[in-house]
Image (spheres, rainbow, N blue to C red):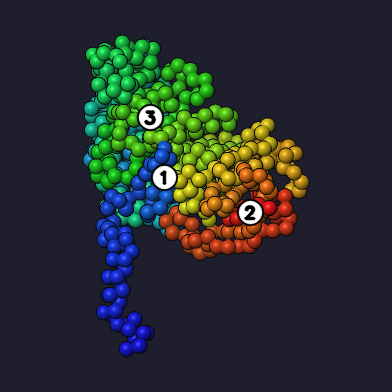
Amino acid sequence: MNMRQERKNPLFRLFVVAALLVLVPGLGAGAAKAPGDISSLPHLVSKDGRHALILDGAPFLILGAQCHNSSAWPAMLPKVWPAIEYLHANTLEIPVYWEQFEPEPGKFDTSVVDTLLQQAREHNVRLVLLWFGTWKNGSSHYMPLWMKSQPDKYPRIIGRNGRRVDSPSPHAPATLAADTRAFSALMRHLKAKDRQHTVILVQVENAPGSWGSVRDFSPEAQKLFMAPVPAELLKAFGTNAATGGNWTEVFGANADEYFHAWSIARFIGQVAAAGKAEYPLPLYVNAALRDPLTPGPGNTYESGGPTDNVLWIWKAAAPAIDLLAPDIYQNDSARYRKVLELYSRPDTALFVPETRGSPEQARLCFAALGRGAIGWAPFGLDYTAYANEPLEAPRLTEQSLAQVALNYRMLEPIMHEVARLSFEGKLQAVAEEPGEATQTMDLGDWKVVVSYGGSRRGGGGTAPGNATPTGRALVARIGADQFWVTGVFCRIDFRPASGGQREFLRVEEVAASEGKRTGGGPRGAFRFVRIWNGDETDWGLNFSSAPQALRVRLGTY
Ligand code: DGJ
């Protein structure tokens, strides 16, 4: 038998497979894994205060878009996918409506979820499903009709003045039981129907909390409010306060808000835990924020949700929730950045599930990446002709989506590297600030200087800043003197910390591979496009509006 004949021999093939299973650690384990195996599910990992969402064994970066509230109906999806495709988003965030999912008590209609799964797979994107359950923006408008018609059984909260407030009560056992049953059914269905993990995260409820009353003042709530603060919360508070104190005695002026946060978080924590017991995907709750710099009292924002002052309460009350994620609709970048700071914590990965996708705010994706975000997703990016976000656009067009699309196109070829290097603490990213024409990043042996608005030639030090601050830049260290570099409307240059002068030894442009992509990832490995040299590197690396990603090798002379 010659070598070629030998390779065709079935016994030889068996031998090769067996040898591979023994010699390549993990290969056998991977192959033997049942599709529902927890270790192969999307999951979050944390190390040294940094976080990653692991998908198919590797860190994944959510380049996301959320559709409008009423776009998750099969008839509307043809107006959703073209926007997602144009954006090069790898993940669509889309609601599951309780009123649609459970039209009669205990009878579940999974047809829309199945359509979402099927169409997401056809479009090669992942899904973040948003459970529009008991809470949607502080109200309960997505409860099924059979619940809405029984307001005494599924009550709203009562304000201080005794009037009903349009917000569901977290102290209603029937509501809790109904939501728990429905959310569990959803997760059970995903477990059965989503072996390929099209769904990577699930949002439990939407922006829970209450507008118009700091808390529930119903008789049931009053009884709990006058009772001793639960020991778990006292422990999380790290207080010396004697156990046995009621909410006012322990928390003083914050008692009302803390009580409401605890009550809602306990409710949602139970719904989440039941869903997770069915199918343990990572779960999160999104927050309607309070002003991060000058917050007023609890009755001036949506009280009870995971605002920055009560994250610790949510952590203690709802351990089944993995992430507390800010919806950032702040217009000024100081507030935007403060929110990023407040929600990137050693115990919570930063994920921005909603934000503005306006041309001016697209750059702030890079501010989030600079804080180690696992993903970023503007709200309302579809062509259903409802345009509340971005507020500036009367109608959403490719032109109004162009700056977000630019982000995703430039990050697409290196998205896995970006997610991995961010997790390893080797990535820095910045967004242009008004009045700050130059920014620096420290990458150990190399200082990175990012300048905005200068001419393509000459010193970056004289750059005036862009007319509107739209610049952004990202640099990630691959090896000692090697980096991934990408940016928009900026120049990126390097200074050796040890002195000497920087030399670009090799600057390679890469692009996403051509062909079909799979499951939200890039189209296979990126491909080499060309080497930048001459005008393209003589004054630093100038980026304009083209989606370009570079692999850069530096030296000194
Ligand atoms: C935040 C909510 O979470 C979304 O569902 C949507 O209502 C947006 N606000 C609208 O701006």
Tell me the kind of residue under disc 2: Gly
Mark sitting on residue 555: 2
Q: Quadrant of the N terminus?
A: bottom left
Tell me the SS state at disc 2.
strand
**In the foreground, 447 or 9:** 447
Mark sitting on residue 287: none
Tell me the SS state at disc 3.
loop
Tell me the kind of residue under disc 1: Ala
**Picture coordinates of residue 356 (x, y %)?**
54, 37
Q: Residue furthest bottom?
A: 1
Q: Is residue 100 left or right of residue 417?
A: left
**In the foreground, 526 or 284:** 526
* Residue under label 1: 52
Residue 268 drawn above or below residue 523: above
* Residue under label 3: 208
Q: Residue at x 34, y 86 (%)?
A: 5
Residue 233 drawn above or below residue 486: above
Q: Quick one: label 2 or label 1, which is nearer the N terminus? A: 1
